[in-house]
Image (tube, rainbow, N blue to C red):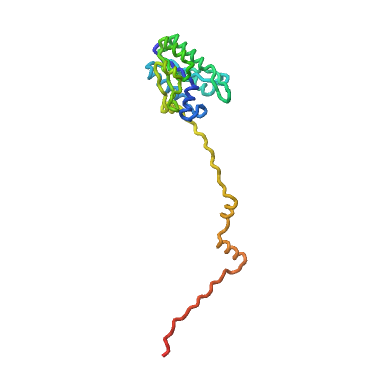
Amino acid sequence: MDRCVVLVDAGYLLGAAASLLAGEPARSRISVDHATLIQGLRERAEAETECPLLRIYWFDGAPDRVPQPEHRRLRVMPRVTVRLGALTRSDGRWAQKGVDAAMHAELTELARNRACADIVLVTGDGDLLPGLMSAKEHGVAVHLWAVQAADGDYNQSEDLVAEADERRVLDRAWITRAVRAKELPGPCAPVSEPRPEIAAILSAPLPETAAAAAAAATGSPGTAEAPVAVTAPPGPAPT
């Protein structure tokens, strides 16, 4: 069938996007416009494979496999199917369980049933290598898409890169159409207060002001100025 399918490892796609835009792979550091992201994936897949899209499979982890709000939004979008693995916390970090196995099963099943001519993989995990090779053996062209690496190097398994029929990079310009780094609130600058001795100096009255205030309080006149003697000009000398 001359159709294409996109398999997305959401943990890889969004984690790598967070690394690229926010400097760390925490998905909490980014905001995602999922509708724009899905539309971008569809348009790019159809353009590069020259085949109409059959479906986008979105693979992600969730605690107890319970759909989160983003999964609920995704699974009602046209041509999108959400597959959830477990999300567990170990040593203070979250880890996906069962996502790779689900992607592998879907990849091999699509190829075996000849449901499509081209498969786009958005992942970096080398565990999908057997599934990728199986798909190729069934005559499916496999396109491997990477998110631009933050350090300019590969963020995918070298074996996947070597086995894929085509490889493309989703660069920063493409990613930022749908993904933004969240602005972190900066620390508030402390308000500096003058030391007590400095405050006393600044609040003290000026000397002339203090003298005037003291004179007004006692009712004593200020210091009188000495009179200035005026000397008459000399008259004519006596004859």
Q: What residue occupies the far right of the structure in this picture?
A: 218
What's the residue at 51%, 34% (across, down)? 184
Where residue 175 sits in the image (x, y, percent)? 43, 26
- Figure check: 174 above or below 211: above
The image quadrant of residue 38 is top left
Where residue 81 sits in the image (x, y, percent)? 48, 17
Residue 79 in view of the camera? no
Q: What residue occupies the far bottom of the structure in this picture?
A: 239
Quadrant for the C terminus, please. bottom left
Quadrant for the N terminus, please. top left
On the picture, is 174 further left or further right than 212? Answer: left
Residue 81 in view of the camera? yes
- Figure check: 229 above or below 104: below
The image quadrant of residue 93 is top right
- Figure check: 33 above or below 163: below
What's the residue at 50%, 77% (across, down)? 229
The image quadrant of residue 37 is top left
Numbered circles on residues, count: 0
Where residue 114 sits in the image (x, y, percent)? 43, 9
Where residue 72 sits in the image (x, y, percent)? 52, 21
Q: Foreground residue, 9 or 75?
A: 9
